[in-house]
Structure formats: C-alpha cells, structure tokens
Image (spheres, grey):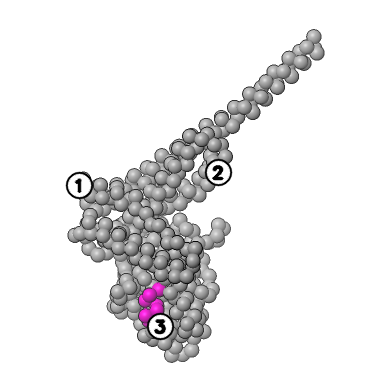
C-alpha cells in the first residue's frame, strides 16, 4: 500500500514539474509584459504631455495648423553622415548640425513668428527635448509590440533590465523639456553662469557665432570671457568663435568650465580639474578648439562641476551653484600657470538657458534657483 502510494506521489510530482517547466516561461513573460506595457504607456504619456505643453507655449489656444505642425515636427530625425572614411567627418557632422538648427529655426518661424528671439530660442530647446523623449517612447513601444509578436522571453528580459535607466532618463527629459521651453536655468547652465559672474557689469559683445564676449584683467592676466549668448536656450558655436579669437589675439592659455557626468556615489556640485577641452556634444566644436590649440601650442585647462546626466537637463540646483568658490579657486590656479600680461581665454561651456550675459543676470538666476529650492521644500512638506 505504501509503495503504491509512493509511486502515485512520484507520478504527481513528475507531472507537476513537467507542467511547471512548460508554463513557467509563459507565466514570467506575462508578468514582464504587464510591467513593460505599463512603462510604455507611462512614457507615451510623458511624450503626449510634452507635446501639449509645447503647443501651449506657442499659443494659449493653438489652432489646427499649429497642432499639425508640432505633431509632424515631433517625428523629425537627423541621419549621421557616413564615417567609413574618417577624413573630413568633422566638417560633415558640422554641416548636418547646422542644417538641423536651420530646420528648428524654420519650424519656430512657421508656428510662432511673433515671439521674441529669446523665447524662440527657448522653444527650440524645448522641442529638442520633446523630440528625444518622443523617440524613447516610440522605441520602448516598438520592443513591447515586438515581444508580443515573437513571444521572445529573452528580448523581454533584456528590455526589463534596461527599463529603470530608460525611465530615469525619460523622467529627466520630461522635466527638462518644460524647463527649457520656459527658458529656466538647467544643470548644464553652470558653466555659462560662472562666466556671467566674472563678466561683471560690463556689456558683453555678441558675435555671429551666437557667443557673448567680454574682457577683464584677472591677477595680472588679460582674460577674454566667453559664453553662449543668453538668456535664451543656446549653446552657440564656441569652436568657431575660439578659432577666430586665436587668429585675432595671441592666446597663451585656454580654460573651459563645464558640467560633467558624475559617477554614482560622487557628490553633485563637486569640482575637478584636468587638461583638455571640457565640452560634450558630438565633438565638432571641441575639435575646432583642439585643432587651433595644437596648431598654436596653447595649453588647455579644464574645470568640471559634477552632476548626473539627468541633473544636467533638469532645473539648476543650489548644490551646483555652491561650487562657485571652488571653481574660482581652480580658475585662479590655472591663471597662475600663465605669465603676467598673457592673454587667457576662459570659456563657460554649456546651454545658457536662463542665464544672461553679465553679473546682474547671473544674480537673477541665483534668485530663481533659491525660489525653486523653496518650492521643492514646500512640496516635500506636503
């Protein structure tokens, strides 16, 4: 009797394990799909909200033409040039980037011809963020639909593992799109803000390369200060501007200040010094500066304020502004490596959204950050 009972028990267990191993992947796939579908809908919601926000920034009552134009432009894309033969690739990328900016200019003129120049610049930056967010939402939706069709457990696992990072960046873009469209300062504005503080009361000269220039004497050195023309959301063409300045003046040293990605565990707003050109992006502007520096044997110093990639596209924080003292000390150390009377070029790299071209404008930015911090504390209490 006992032996017969044992035989039945073993048979039941074998059947159970066979059924379990047969259906377990499908059960897991169903659970993952619920998570992926939920995330895809959330990202699509971010994209839709950003699109609606951009339309409301153009007009409080956008008509059918504006809505259709914005919807169409959210599908805008840029194709990278062929790089199999690296010769001339920088000029190719530069050409494509300028074409891209011209298309954004044309778009803004179409939908909002009466807006001021600064507001137009903000709108272009907001659109750029919205388009990137829209692309992320589309890619996640693509894989969700692909997994539904193929029932591929492996693809589902890969996407699920990447999802926390994707959602983190999407949330930052969602907030950053609104901040940029409003013309408010972002983390990446820290470099231009530092330079604005140094410009003082002087009125900066704006060039055709969309940069603001000012000169002052610092510690016995003649310093040319450069940043993108603000307070509209611009990055300018600092590479070309530096090339022209080097041809015009005998520059003995170049210092760049920029936001840079921190590692997890590092403190936001911490400062580091190095050599080279502190500048992100596709590398075109940095290449122009490096080529000019090599040709004229100009030392390159860099100062970075650390923040995460998400913080760089979100509103500027007090912890980042607190780096001012340390950055200025780093600038002083860099200047000490130049001789008395030397010409030094100091470049505040980054998006100058919400940051004007002198110390008074920089103070306005500081006050905005203080108000923003106060609003965050208020929300946290609630």
Relative to residue 337, is residue 37 depicted above or below? above
> Depth check: 222 or 72 in front?
72
Relative to residue 182, is residue 86 depicted above or below? below
For label 1, the SS is: loop
Residue occupying image coordinates x 59% and y 27%? 23
Instruction: Report the magenta residues as a range.
Output: 239-245
Give the image location of residue 184, x and y in percent: 33, 60
For label 3, the SS is: helix
Extreme bottom residue here?
341
Residue at which label 3 appears = 246
Residue at which label 1 appears = 63
> Depth check: 363 or 243 in front?
243
Give the image location of residue 327, x and y in percent: 47, 73
Name the image quarter holding the N terminus. Answer: top right
CA separation, marks 1 and 3? 49 Å
Q: Can residue 292 be seen? A: yes
How many tags in the picture? 3
Residue at which label 2 appears = 158
264 on left or right of 344 = right
Q: Residues within 10 Å of mark 1 (few under 14, many from 20)?
A: few
Give the image location of residue 90, x and y in percent: 43, 69
């Amino acid at each position: 009797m006992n032996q017969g009972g044992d035989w039945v028990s073993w048979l039941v267990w074998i059947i159970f394990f066979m059924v379990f191993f047969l259906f377990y992947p499908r059960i897991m796939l169903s659970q993952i799909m619920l998570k992926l579908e939920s995330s895809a809908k959330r990202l699509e919601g971010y994209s839709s909200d950003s699109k609606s926000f951009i339309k409301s920034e153009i007009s409080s009552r956008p008509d059918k033409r504006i809505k259709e134009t914005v919807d169409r432009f959210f599908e805008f894309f840029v194709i990278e040039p062929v790089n199999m033969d690296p010769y001339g690739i920088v000029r190719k990328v530069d050409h494509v980037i300028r074409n891209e900016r011209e298309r954004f200019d044309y778009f803004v003129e179409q939908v909002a011809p009466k807006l001021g120049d600064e507001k137009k610049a903000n709108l272009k930056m907001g659109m750029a963020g919205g388009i990137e967010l829209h692309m992320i939402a589309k890619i996640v939706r693509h894989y969700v639909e692909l997994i539904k069709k193929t029932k591929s457990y492996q693809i589902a696992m890969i996407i699920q593992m990447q999802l926390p990072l994707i959602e983190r960046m999407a949330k930052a873009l969602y907030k950053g799109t609104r901040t940029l469209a409003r013309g408010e300062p972002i983390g990446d504005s820290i470099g231009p803000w530092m330079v604005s503080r140094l410009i003082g009361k002087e009125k900066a000269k704006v060039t055709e390369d969309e940069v603001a220039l000012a000169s002052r004497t610092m510690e016995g050195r003649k310093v040319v200060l450069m940043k993108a023309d603000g307070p509209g959301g611009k990055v300018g063409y600092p590479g070309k501007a530096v090339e022209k300045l080097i041809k015009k003046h005998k520059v003995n040293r170049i210092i760049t200040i920029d936001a840079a990605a921190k590692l997890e565990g590092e403190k936001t707003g911490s400062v580091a010094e190095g050599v080279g050109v502190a500048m992100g992006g596709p590398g075109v502007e940095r290449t122009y500066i490096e080529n000019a520096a090599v040709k004229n044997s100009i030392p390159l110093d860099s100062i970075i304020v650390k923040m995460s990639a998400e913080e760089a596209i979100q509103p500027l924080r007090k912890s980042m502004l607190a780096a001012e003292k340390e950055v200025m000390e780093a600038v002083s150390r860099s200047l000490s490596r130049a001789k008395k009377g030397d010409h030094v070029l100091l470049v505040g790299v980054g998006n100058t959204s919400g940051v004007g071209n002198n110390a008074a404008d920089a103070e306005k930015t500081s006050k905005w950050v203080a108000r923003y911090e106060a609003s965050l504390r208020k929300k946290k209490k609630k």
